[in-house]
Image: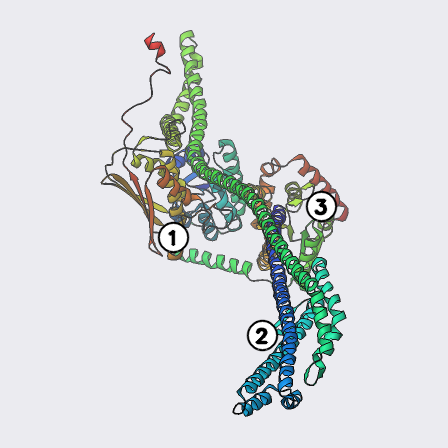
Amino acid sequence: MPGEITSDINILLVDDEPLVLQSLSATFRKQYNVYTATNGKEAIEIIRKYTIHVVLSDQRMPGMLGHEVLRIIKTISPSTIRILLTGYSDLDAIMNSVNSGEVFRYLTKPWKVEQLRETVAAAAQIASKVSQLYPVKPASSPETTDQSQEIELETQAETEQVETPMPDFQGQKDKLLIVEFNKEQLNMMVKVFNKKYEVLPCASVDEAFEQLSKHEVPVMVTDLNLNSEDGIDFLYAIKQEYPNIVIILLTQVRDALLAIKSINEFQVYRYHVKPCSVEDLDKTIQSAMMRARSYRTQPLKNVHFVAKQVVPDIIEKQASQKGNWLRDRLKGLKKFFGV
Amino acid sequence: MPKPKSKEKLIAKYSELIIYGILFLILVAAVFVVNINLTTSSQQVTNQIYLATKQQEFWQTSYRNLLSTQTSLVEYSVLKEEIGFSHPDIYSEINSLNNPETIKALAKRYSNQDSVISAKLNMVAWKLDQVITSFNTYKEAIQFFDQTVVVLNNGGEIQIDGQTVSIDQLNDEASKKHIKNISVIWRFAKDLVNEFVHKKTNGLPNENLLSNAIDFAITKDQSIQSNNRSFIVSLGTLAAGRVDNLLLIQIGALALSIIVFVAMSVRLAISLRKQDEIIRESQSQLIQSEKMASLGQMVAGLAHEMNTPLGFVRNNVEIIDENEKEFNEAHKKIKMILDHLLKGNYDNLEKSIPEAIQKIKQIDQVGLFEENSTMLESSLQGLDRIQELIVNLKNFSRLDQTAEQMANLNECLDSTLIIAHHLLKRHVTVHKQYAQIPDTVCAPAQLNQVFLNIFSNAAHATEEKGEGHLTIKTWCEKDQIVVQISDDGKGIPQEILDKIFDPFFTTKPVGQGTGLGLSISRKIIEEAHNGKISVKSKIGVGTDFFIYIPLRSLDKEDTTNVFVSDEAVIN
């Protein structure tokens, strides 16, 4: 590993193919400290030992799959920004992993160096910002064992805080925005969730924009297939203006590329395929509410929010004209209603 | 909406069948009913003929007895008169006696005194007996005759010889006419005969009435008899007509049923052929889709295998390009120094030399040259891998080669393993135990499809466990090659083990498998290669597939000619 060039950003590359690792290290060694691992186990060991800002992992490896590795890394080092490199035949597996990995970006093979560097650079910037939130891990742990214990306790406390459902916020019900163009399905969902949440039903993009600008909405459940409007542009606009909103997709299309896109472009929180059980959706909404609360109290936990602040170009670059147009409309409404 | 449509079609098809069935049943039932009808009516005719014959018999009996009554009566009177001449006392005695037994007793009394008179008296008694018997027979016969006339005319029941014969009223006008005639003739004589039968003078038939009755009998005998005969004859023709009808109906019914049957079988044949076509079509479609599925598997595997080298080769080239820029810069700087030296601009050297040295140092420090050569080397390796994959793709599909050719199954297995690498790589360790096996004539592309199918099943079977072993053994056995492919996956339940080679049998969820993979595999092994494929499995232990391919060499004699025709050679 080229250790001569010192940088304060550490990145970890995980791939079972040594030639890929060689090639990628050559790509990044100039800007970052590069660590490599040829399997999940090694990667996790490295994460335990060093502070890693960005991890770039292949999906298909012997033993642990990429998204599983990333999930474990997340629990060990929540500040590490995770990027998954996926091949053509992994799409099905990705579809299943979207909901568990909470990955910053999915990149597809074969990649372009420029794009890869851009993404990793953005991730590095985000990571350096986010890491302010978490206590710095010592480069070598053995000398300060008590400190590391402390960290463990702290992270434990943190996760507990996230996991225990909070009592109703100021005695109020949480707001839940549901966007669904099918009136019947909308009514049904309103009926199901009306007891627990203050449901804001929307049957059109305009209604959704209006509700969003009138209320502070923590969580929204939406379909991607919104009649004539392109759901992706619609969600892009919303996420740009309200980065703290947690989006749950509820859609009929089981499309891995679409799932990847919705993660890369507006950091969708969960991707549910219709029809899904009420129980599952309810659980997802609950955890989304907790996520929204943590975003409110600690905005730095919201990777997308940080990304928007630190590297706005990488996100805005992907937007279509339509998306920008929708965003402008939403901006106007926001000014008008004030939220 | 294709389902309800096909359902409608099905109903239409079945309703057609049902209509045919009903038609057939109706036909059979109609023939049955007609037959029964005809049988009962011919039973009627038989009864009528029987009765008519009986009528004739009664008439003849009565006629005969009437005449014999008369003659006996005359003879009796003559005999009595004879006695009267010689023995008037006895005459007066017997004149009042109308009983043959008493006269016989008288004769016995006289037998000792006068044998002549006794014999005469016996004669008288005998004659008297004859008169009474004839008269009684006549009476009985004529009464029966009367009854037959009534019954034949109006229908009803009659007791003859202890048997009850029941007769329906006649419908046939022609035969009815005859019995009517008899009835009309009889009506006039009936009272007279009745009187004659019931009225007796001195215990004997009344002679006046007797002569009237005889008068009637003689004058009407012919008429009655001929009517009776005509009646019987007309009934006979009626019965004959019925038989003809019956025959006609039966022939008609037979013809109709043949027509219905032929129509039915033609329809059935047509729809069966159609069905057959549909089945064949959908089967070939499914086989096609199975081929597409295995092609898809191959493409997925290949795409994945290619993506990796393609990815890093591309990356390497870009890095080499970047490094080259550094080299160019250094090159430029050195060239400038040389330029300055040549032109004697020594002043500029002071600035240029340290710059160039720094650049070169930088390059050396980072090891850009080494990096470039490693990058180039690894790129070449990557390109070799891509080339290898392409070659393997050719080996796997053998699109550019004939289907049947000499090939080594070990090589086939290897090229399939590369295609299946992406399926197996994550969790399956492959153990190869190949024996030295001779080449054999086979269709490698098809065999590869079979192997890929089994490998992919093995990958699925070991998926839950997280790690598995795939053992591939090949060996030669007499005149065949055996390939054993074993996995240590979850195994196949005994109850479905027999079914796995059946078409459309699948354990995968709907949409994830056509259920044709193994059935096509069997077809390939058994039909195209004359081989055998079998399976052994144990739950939780694993599954073993055995494939037996008979050894075959290329046909020695090459029958194809060099030229299309040998005329040109001769000329």
Determine the image quadrant of residue B429.
top left
Residue A241: image x %, image y %?
A: 67, 44
In the rendered image, is residue B194 in sight? Answer: no
Q: Is residue B545 left or right of residue A194?
A: left
Q: Residue at label 3? A: A205
Residue B499: image x %, image y %?
A: 41, 51
Q: Residue at label 1? A: B498
Q: Amino acid at mark 3?
A: Val
Spatial CA span between label 1 and label 2: 78 Å
Q: Label 1 lies in what chain?
A: B
Q: Secondary structure at mark 2?
A: loop
Q: Does the residue at mark 3 contact the one at mark 2 (Cβ under 8 Å)?
A: no
CA neighbours of label 1 inside 10 A, class few (<14), some (14 to 19), many (20+): few
Pair 1/3: label in front: 1
Q: Label 3 lies in what chain?
A: A
Q: Amino acid at mark 1?
A: Asp
Question: Compared with residue B123, is residue A275 higher up or lower down, i.e. above or below?
Answer: above
Q: Amino acid at mark 2?
A: Asp
CA neighbours of label 2 inside 10 A, class few (<14), some (14 to 19), many (20+): few
Pick the front one: B465 or B314 = B465
Query: Of the numbered discs in the image, which one, if any, rests on residue B161?
Result: 2
Discs 3, 2: same chain = no
Residue A315: image x %, image y %?
A: 60, 39
Q: Label 2 lies in what chain?
A: B
Question: Compared with residue B177, is residue B388 higher up or lower down, i.e. above or below?
Answer: above
